[in-house]
Image (cartoon, rainbow, N blue to C red):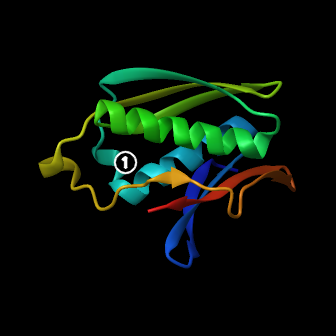
Amino acid sequence: MRAHWEHFPHEADMGVRGIGPSEAQAFEQAALAMTAIITDPSTIQPLELIRIECEAPDDALLLAEWLNSLLYEMSTRQMLFGRFAVELGQGALRGRAWGERVDPERHHPAVEVKGATYTSLRVAQEEGTWIAQTVVDV
């Protein structure tokens, strides 16, 4: 099983789903799916590293915290991220995101993602594959 991401339909917003052989990889892929709503992740150069730490009482809430922390960093730093690394343990996440400042001419940002919601929020293992999903407000 190769880690990957996908979008799923949800009324006026957009669902993001990360899929991977590990829970951490599913979180990484969910972040990539969120970036792919804004722009093509392959256009983002990994020029700057940002570290993010989150805590939550369960893995589903930790996913929402992770995605919202990334959105905060994107907004305040005016950056896009196209590569992610996540370490999980005991209700905590240590993440790294690589990216660069937004270049409208090269990135062609389509929409602004406002936040990860609790709608369809789910982190689970199914038949050996991890799924991390939620709906983001666009």
Let me know if residue 21 appears in the view.
Answer: no
Label total for image: 1
Q: Which image quadrant for residue 68? A: top right
Residue located 58% across and 49% down the image: 30
Q: Is residue 48 left or right of residue 17?
A: left
Crowding around mark 1 (Cα neighbors within 10 Å: few <14, some 14 to 19, many 20+) is some
Foreground pick, 34 / 46: 34
Residue 109, above or below 50: below
The answer to whether residue 108 is left or right of residue 129 is left
Q: Residue furthest bottom?
A: 11
Q: Which residue is depicted at the point 58% across and 52% down?
A: 4
Asked if residue 78 shows in the view, the reply is yes
The residue at 35%/56% (across/down) is: 112
> Residue 89, percent across and down?
79, 24
Tell me the kind of residue under disc 1.
Pro
Secondary element at image label 1: helix
Residue at the spot 58% in from the left edge and 75% down from the top edge: 10
Q: Quadrant of residue 101?
A: top left
Q: Which residue is mark 1?
A: 41
Residue 25 location (% of width, % of height) = 65, 39
Up/down of 79 relative to 1, above or below: above
Image height of 47 relative to 104, above or below: above
Q: Position of residue 14 (x, y in %)?
A: 52, 67
Percent coordinates x, y for residue 130 in the rendering: 76, 49
Residue 87 vs residue 58: left or right? left
